[in-house]
Amino acid sequence: MITSLTLLKKKGEYEPLLRTLRRFAAVYTDEMWSYPFFQSISETERFLETEPVVDLVNWDVTIDGALALLEKMRSQCQKACLMIIADMSISPMQYLKPGILPEALLLKPINSDDMENVVRALFEVFIRRMDDQEDAFLVETREGKQYIPMEQIDYFEAKEKKVFVRVKSCEYGFYDTLDTLEKRLPSGFIRCHRSYI
């Protein structure tokens, strides 16, 4: 499942963005998508504490405290494709910097042509990244594919005739053996028990 997280001040701005995101998701991928949406910093922060993998981020930097949380989120989710949503009240020097590194910028007031062009460009970057995921672990299930950045993986566990990859508070199960998995993983992973890597 691919997760597209949105933090946006006004729900009225979110609905056209959601329609555009869904349309491009259907055109570019066959995966299942989730679209969590938040209007407050505290809700977003709680979500980020529990959600291990965020693939696409749409972030309104005009909300008080949004820039500080964005920098924290970027340190945890470096591989996520980021679209900044801003207006002229905030200087680009605040969000166009190395710690944030957005792939796209959408300026308010948002018009449909700009949104279409920016989201298309964002998806093109996102799809290229998905295809080039050397430093990510791919879990394929009936629900679709989940790319998990290697640095976010806590451990692998064999149980119930499956292998489970643990990331924060989530587990993703797939059919494999730890012996074959151990050969495919980079040297940073160690077999510490017959049921754990």
Image: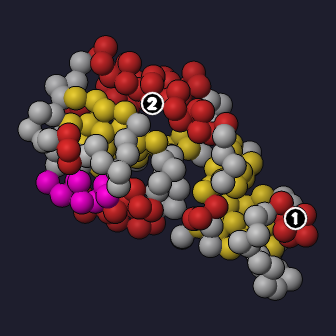
Percent x, y for residue 16?
Answer: 31, 25
Find residue 27 and report its image quarter. Answer: top right
Seen from the viewer's position, the closer of residues 181 and 13 is 181
Residue 73 can be seen in this image? yes
Label 1 with label 2: CB-CB less than 8 Å: no
Residue 170 can be seen in this image? no
Left or right of 31 in this view: 19: left
Give the residue number, with chain letter if any, for mark 2: 122
Q: Residue at x 81, y 79 (%)?
A: 191
Percent x, y for residue 67?
Answer: 23, 54
Is residue 104 found inside the magenta-colored segment of the image?
A: no
Seen from the viewer's position, the closer of residues 11 and 89 is 89
Q: Amino acid at mark 2?
A: Leu
Q: Residue at x 66, y 54 (%)?
A: 135
Sequence-first disc among 1 and 2: 2
Q: CA distance from mark 1 to mark 2?
A: 34 Å
Q: Which residues are magenta?
A: 64-71
Q: Amino acid at mark 1?
A: Lys
Q: Magenta part mainly helix, strand or loop? A: helix
Percent x, y for residue 97?
Answer: 30, 48
Give the residue number, with chain letter if any, for mark 1: 183
Identify the mark at residue 89; answer none if there is no mark.
none
Q: Residues within 10 Å of mark 1 (few under 14, many from 20)?
A: few
Left or right of 146 in this view: 63: left
